[in-house]
């Protein structure tokens, strides 16, 4: 690969950056004729790169799947980003940690010394704390869904609802979003004629259809905002109505948008907040995170849990006096 002309390296880089390229656009990017592009494509094929011709009114080329991965052309920033991501992989994705380590070891073998130093420095300083419990997305399904988003390809799959029942869905995938260690697919559901959010760990039997679509306008500024809004509107098992001695802006700053069902300013210094969750301990954590005085209304079960929790905290600290913290003791992060 070191003897390949610079033009062919540029051509390969272009083919890796986008799904399809018209021959005329490649020629313009490379400042050569389309005949030269065809000749360079033939040379790439001879070297084992699976470059496919595409049909249509214009026609062009794409880098297709092969029996083995061709060498990737990465700039320094891309290489470091991939290596660090592999070192910290991968929240909410099941069974990928060992695979990530194997992939990283292969990358580090071919990194030049300057990159190896950067990756080691960042990797040694970064730790990823994963939550051990809870469902995790299948890496193969996540990759297939993400590719369908990239290629604007309609997919079908089975989706398991919160009550355990499953339904067949056919969607135009838009984006994949990670929120609170869960992966979500934002898509337009063709059978229900509307936008939906799907937990990727509840998706199975994904089938690409080969049908392309023109992307619709998302009813939000971005996919992350849409997911946050959808999660906040979901029917939770437990709901608390909380009057907080803090402004709505302060509450928003202390709680992520995805955990707030509704927030309304009562006055300049008070706000009414609705919190929802499927577990009572999560609601307790969010109340503590408010960092202000509050009053709570909710179901008898929820209020009983909070009273018992408060009693345990009082009993645990009753009769004890706080000791001064040593000057050199580690304090909270600023």
Image (tube, helix red, strand yellow):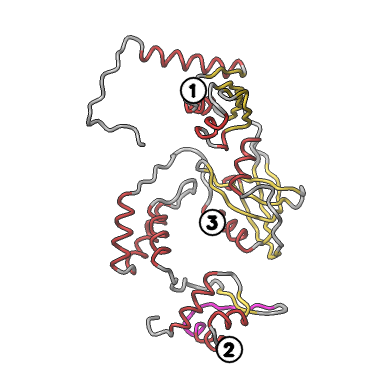
188 or 93, which is in the foreground? 188
Which region is colored magenta? 44-55
Kindly report the distance in space between the C-alpha atoms of the residues bearing marks 3 and 1.
Answer: 44 Å
Q: Which quarter of the rendering shows the C terminus? A: top left
> What residue does disc 3 label?
140
Q: Are marks 1 and 2 in contact (CB under 8 Å)?
A: no
Q: Is residue 213 above or below residue 265?
A: below
Question: Is 48 inside the magenta-drawn segment?
Answer: yes
> What residue does disc 1 label?
292
Q: Tag 1 or tag 3, which sits nearer the N-term?
A: 3
> What residue does disc 2 label?
33
* SS at badge 2: loop
Q: Where is residue 6? Give x, y as percent.
A: 44, 82
Kindly report the distance in space between the C-alpha atoms of the residues bearing marks 1 and 2.
Answer: 68 Å
On screen, residue 259 versus residue 190, left or right, reads: left
Instruction: Please name which of the two marks, 1 or 2, marks the residue nearer to the observer.
Output: 1
Instruction: Please name which of the two marks, 3 or 1, marks the residue nearer to the observer.
Output: 1
Instruction: Please name which of the two marks, 2 or 3, marks the residue nearer to the observer.
Output: 2
């Amino acid at each position: 690969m070191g003897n390949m002309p610079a033009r062919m390296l540029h051509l390969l880089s272009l083919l890796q950056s986008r799904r399809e390229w018209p021959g005329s656009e490649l020629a313009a990017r490379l400042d050569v004729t389309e005949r030269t592009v065809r000749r360079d494509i033939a040379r790439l094929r001879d070297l084992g790169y699976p470059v496919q011709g595409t049909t249509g009114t214009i026609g062009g080329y794409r880098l297709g799947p092969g029996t083995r991965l061709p060498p990737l052309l990465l700039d320094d920033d891309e290489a470091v980003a991939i290596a660090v991501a592999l070192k910290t992989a991968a929240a909410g994705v099941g069974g990928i940690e060992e695979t990530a380590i194997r992939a990283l070891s292969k990358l580090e073998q071919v990194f030049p010394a300057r990159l190896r130093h950067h990756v080691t420095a960042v990797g040694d300083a970064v730790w990823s704390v994963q939550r051990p419990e809870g469902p995790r997305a299948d890496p193969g399904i996540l990759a297939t869904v993400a590719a369908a988003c990239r290629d604007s390809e309609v997919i079908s799959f089975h989706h398991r609802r919160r009550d355990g029942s499953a339904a067949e869905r056919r969607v135009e995938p838009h984006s994949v979003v990670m929120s609170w260690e869960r992966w979500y697919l934002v898509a337009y559901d063709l059978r229900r004629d509307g936008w939906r959010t799907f937990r990727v760990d509840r998706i199975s039997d994904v089938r690409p259809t080969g049908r392309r679509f023109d992307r619709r306008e998302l009813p939000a500024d971005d996919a992350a905002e849409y997911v946050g809004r959808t999660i906040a509107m979901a029917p939770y098992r437990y709901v608390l109505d909380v009057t907080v001695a803090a402004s709505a802006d302060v509450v928003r700053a202390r709680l992520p948008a995805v955990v707030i069902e509704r927030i309304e300013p009562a006055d300049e210094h008070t706000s009414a907040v609705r919190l929802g969750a499927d577990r009572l301990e999560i609601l307790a954590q969010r109340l503590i995170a408010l960092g202000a005085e509050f009053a709570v209304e909710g179901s008898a079960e929820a209020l009983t849990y909070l009273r018992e929790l408060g009693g345990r905290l009082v009993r645990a600290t009753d009769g004890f006096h706080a000791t001064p913290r040593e000057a050199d003791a580690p304090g909270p992060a600023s």
